[in-house]
Image: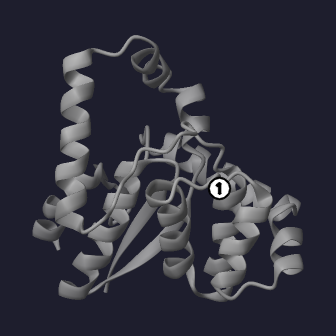
Amino acid sequence: MKEIEYFLDCSSPWTYLSFRGILELEKKKEFKIIWKPILVGGIFNSINPSVYETRKNPVKEKMDYSQKDLQDWAALRDVNINWPKIFPINSVKAMRGAFYFIDKAGIEGYLESVFQSYWTNGKDISDIEILLEIAESCGAIPKEFLDFIDTPEAKQRLIQNTQELMDRGGFGSPTFFIDNTDMYFGNDRIQLIESVL
């Protein structure tokens, strides 16, 4: 069975769309998703600072189209995206929490809840109380989850995945790899992934 490595950070709306897209594709094709939570801000700081420049000096026409494009994709993926008041968001604890659910199962439900809480309901997922509510609703033991996301191991795993993506030529979220070297970036590449599969 093919494996698809999926590098993702819930702070990106395009990643939410890709999350829904890859799960839809999984119903049609046989492959295994290897979940790779990352911190996309670390990538922007290290190798892709142009993202910040674009935010400081946006081209109005491009920004207007980008919002239309986002909503067009949201309709296609059956996702309700409401641009949150807090953007960008500090997703580090939420992404460390993803490893808890990778280890114990339930990663898909957790990620959907995190994405929906932020991108649909506008909740501050950097707030530990809100994150604990999400984790508990997905079956986590609150104290166990809280202790886990503060462990050196959880911190290191997030750092390692982020560095690994950069080392392999990645520059943002979402990024997919098929057969280790065949890289695809962006929600709109899922159709290409399907054709390869």
Q: Which residue lies furthest to the top in this view?
A: 57
Residue at the spot 58% in from the left edge and 39% down from the top edge: 86
User: What kind of colouring is applied to the model shown?
Assistant: one colour
Q: Which amino acid does label 1 sit on?
A: Ile
Q: Which residue lies furthest to the left in this view?
A: 195
Q: Mark 1 = which residue?
A: 125
Residue at the spot 71% in from the left edge and 63% down from the top edge: 130
The image quarter containing residue 6 is bottom left
Q: Can residue 52 be seen in this view?
A: yes
Rendered location of residue 190, percent (x, y):
21, 61
Quarter holding the C terminus is: bottom left
Q: Is residue 190 visible?
A: no
The image quarter containing residue 51 is top left
Q: In this view, does 53 lie above or below 144?
A: above
Q: In this view, does 161 lie above or below 140?
A: above
119 to the left or right of 27 = right
Q: In this view, does 119 lie above or below 195?
A: above
Rendered location of residue 80, percent (x, y):
33, 61
67 to the left or right of 128 = left
The image quarter containing residue 153 is bottom right
Residue at the spot 58% in from the left edge and 52% down from the top edge: 38
Q: Is residue 167 above or below residue 35?
A: above
Choose between 59 and 40: the one closer to the eye. Answer: 59
Rendered location of residue 141, percent (x, y):
81, 85
Task: Give the structural element (helix, strand or loop) at label 1.
Answer: loop
Choose between 127 and 3: the one closer to the eye. Answer: 127
99 to the left or right of 178 = right
Label 1 Cα crowd, 10 Å radius (few <14 / some 14-19 / many 20+): many
Q: Say how many tags the image has.
A: 1
Quarter holding the N terminus is: bottom left
